[in-house]
Image (cartoon, rainbow, N blue to C red):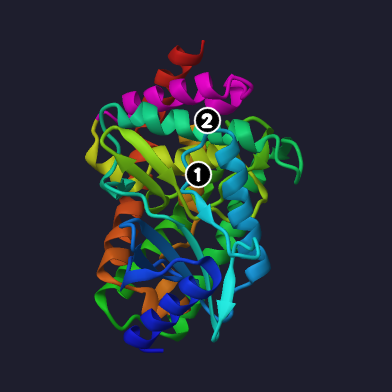
Amino acid sequence: MSAEPAVMVVAGVLALYYRIIPTDVSEGPSGTATCSYVARDADGQRWFVKAYPARADLSAERRALELAEFAALGGVPVPVMRRTLDGDLIATDSGVSVSVAAFVEGAETAEGGLSGKRWAAVGETVGRLHRTLTRHPDGPPRRTPAREVCDVKRGRQHLERLLARYAKQPPSCPFEVWARDAARERLERLPATASMLKALPPTLAAQIIHGDLSSLNLMLKGEKVAAVIDFRPPSHRSPMWELGRIVLDPRTVLTAPNWPAGLAAAVAAYWEANPAMSTEDLLTVPRVAAGYLACSAYPLSEPLDDPSAVTSQLEAYGRDRHQAQRVLWERLPEAEEVLHDLLH
């Protein structure tokens, strides 16, 4: 569907199912699996419209939207969802399925990295989020083997399969050459990664979490968190993995030389907002972050799995992610010492 007819269909869905009469609909930022639009109504209010691909599992998408609404009940800044006239979270018409939420005005994503008071603001928000989600009806927190959070065996399998595929289909561009060489480097370092991960406790906390709390899905306004967006359907995963994923984002680690101190500020704010989380778990954040990156094949596999997804932005992110893993590894003792001083 071309852009203009798509905009017209979205405008029609808004009027028919949401009683929003748009005066303007334009294309917005799009994710890896969705397109989006921004609509303005007669009162001047703007709405964020997410359009799902035809292959999308709408049942799972509804559960993700319901999870966002549940988080909002705990005071997490989540854009207010606009339900259809029938009370549904998703409307489908003419082959187009959409959800609608209030547009977050004046905010930016956390892609630029964390600094200043943003560290504590993000830590507090994630702590509030995780504390709220411990009460989710899909189940209370439980313990899970640490090896399942940073799975060296699975990482080895993925990297070996990826290198076998590159052997059959040799790289055809500079990024593919780099991705293949980076995969080789990660594979060679896996024994050292396994040794590093032996210092983790035998089990780690697991609970319902956001599921995709990346810098793209965290909206900031000044030094405050404006919104948490794009939840995944509820599932039990490590909250320490999720905390580390956002506060130790590769771009933050590479651009903030004082990131261990920033990490401590984020963890302190997290702990204050979520005091039930054990200090033993909180101490694992940088080691889990380093181990998870070391075991990951993303985005080294994208040139083969989804060539259309390989943009200049993804290439830059892939290189940053690889370099950040090295930095996390090198400064792990420093980061853990700072956390130990904080938590004891």
Q: Is residue 12 visible?
A: yes
Q: Nearer the viewer, residue 144 or 177?
A: 144
Regarding mark 1 in the picture, which secondary structure is present there?
helix
Residue 343 in the image: above or below residue 20 = above
Q: What's the residue type where badge 2 is placed? A: Gly
Question: Is there a contact, CB below 8 Å, between mark 2 and mark 1?
Answer: no
Name the magenta segment's main secondary structure: helix
- Height in image: 247 above or below 163? above
- Given residues 50 and 342, the one toward you in this image is 50
Query: Which label number is shown at residue 189?
Result: none
Task: Tell which tag, 2 or 1, sits nearer the viewer.
Answer: 2
> Callout 1, which amino acid?
Gly
* Residue drawn at 50 percent across, 44 percent down: 291
Left or right: residue 35 versus residue 283 is left
- Give the image location of residue 264, x and y in percent: 40, 23
Residue where numbered disc 1 is placed: 291
Instruction: Confirm whether the magenta stretch covers residue 265.
Output: yes
Dot 1, crowdedness within 10 Å: few (<14), some or many (≥20)?
many
Q: Quadrant of residue 145?
A: top right
Residue under numbered circle 2: 127
Instruction: Give me the residue at 66% from left, 51% from top.
Output: 234
Q: State the residue at coordinates (35%, 54%).
A: 322
